[in-house]
Amino acid sequence: MGFSLQHPWAFAFGLLGNVISFMTFLAPIPTFYRIYKSKSTEGFQSVPYVVALFSAMLWIFYALIKSNEILLITINVAGCVIETIYVVMYFVYADKKAKWFTAKIFLGLNVGFFGAIMLFTLLLFKGDKRIVTLGWICVGFSVSVFVAPLSIIKRVIQTRSVEYMPFNLSLSLTLSAVVWFLYGLLIKDKYVALPNVLGFTFGVVQMVLYVFYMNKTPVVASGKDAGKLATATATADDHVLVNIAKLSPALPERSSEVHPVMREMGLPARSCAAEVARAAAANRDAVDVLVSRHSPAVGVA
C-alpha cells in the first residue's frame, strides 16, 4: 500500500520520510571524516551506529514479513549500507579495547538478538500473528530510541543551557516524526505511527525548552553538584550521538559533529567541573562558580 499510487498522500509522505531519513543517516559524515583524518576514533562511541544498524535491520524484516512496504525497505536498506560503513570504519581505526567492545555489542545485538527475533517470530507465529508480534517488537525498540532525549532534556533544565541540544536537531526530530506518523496513519499501520507520536512529543518539548533557555544564564554548580554535572555530561553526550544517528537531518559540519565523550570530560587542567570540585573541597564556604566549557561543543546552526 505504501508504494501504491492509489494512495498518493501515503506515497508522498513515505517519499518525504525517505529523504529526511537519508539525510539523517548522512549526518555523522563529518565525525567519520575526522576519524579517517586522525586515524583514531578519539573516544567516539560505536554504540549509536550499531544500534542504528540493528534498527534498520529490524524494520526491513518487518517490511518483508508484512509485504508491499517498499518505502520502508528502501530507506532502511540505505540505512543498513551506510551504518555498516560507519561500523567498519570505526572498527578499523579503534584501539584494541574499543574494537573488542564493538565486536561484543555487534555480535550480541545485530547477530544474537536479531537472530533470536527472527527465529521467535518465524517458528512460533504465522500469518497476522507474526506481523502483530514483530510490529510490537519494532514499536518497543523505537520507543527505547526515542526515550534517549530524556537525558538531554533533564540536563537542559538542570544547567539552564542549550549547549548540547541544537535547535536543528530538535526540529528534525519533530519533522521526521510527523512525516512517518502521517505515513503510518495513511497506510493504517499503527506500528509505524505509534512510536512517532512519542518522537513528536519529545521534539516539541525540546524546541520549547530551547526557546525558553536559549538566552538564560547557565546555572551555577559547586562541590558535589559539579562532579555530578561532569558525569551527566559524558552520559548525555552518548545520547546526542544516538539522536544524531537516528533522528536529525544532515546539519552543517559544526552542528552535526558530536565530540568524543572523553574529550568532553576534559583534561584536569582544563575541566571547569574539576576546578570547581577542587575549589569546593578546599573551601566549603566558597561562593558558587559559573560553569562554562573550554572544550568545543555541538554548535547551533
Image (tube, rainbow, N blue to C red):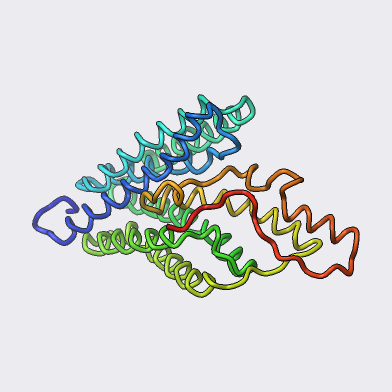
Q: Residue at x 36, y 36 (%)?
A: 82
Q: Position of residue 245 (x, y in %)?
A: 44, 47
Viewer-proximal residue among 46 and 41 = 41
Q: Is residue 14 left or right of residue 44?
A: left
Q: Position of residue 81 (x, y in %)?
A: 34, 34
Q: Quadrant of residue 161?
A: bottom right
* Above/below status of 59 relative to 146: above
Q: Residue at x 17, y 55 (%)?
A: 11
Q: Residue at x 74, y 55 (%)?
A: 273
Q: Residue furthest bottom?
A: 212
* Above/below status of 76 relative to 207: above
Q: Quadrant of residue 267?
A: top right
Quadrant in the picture for the C terminus? bottom left
Q: Residue at x 53, y 26 (%)?
A: 39
Q: Position of residue 5 (x, y in %)?
A: 9, 54
Tally of marks: 0
Q: Is residue 56 left or right of residue 211?
A: left
Q: Position of residue 280 (x, y in %)?
A: 85, 61
Q: Quadrant of residue 27?
A: top left
Viewer-proximal residue among 144 and 261 = 261
Viewer-proximal residue among 268 and 232 = 268
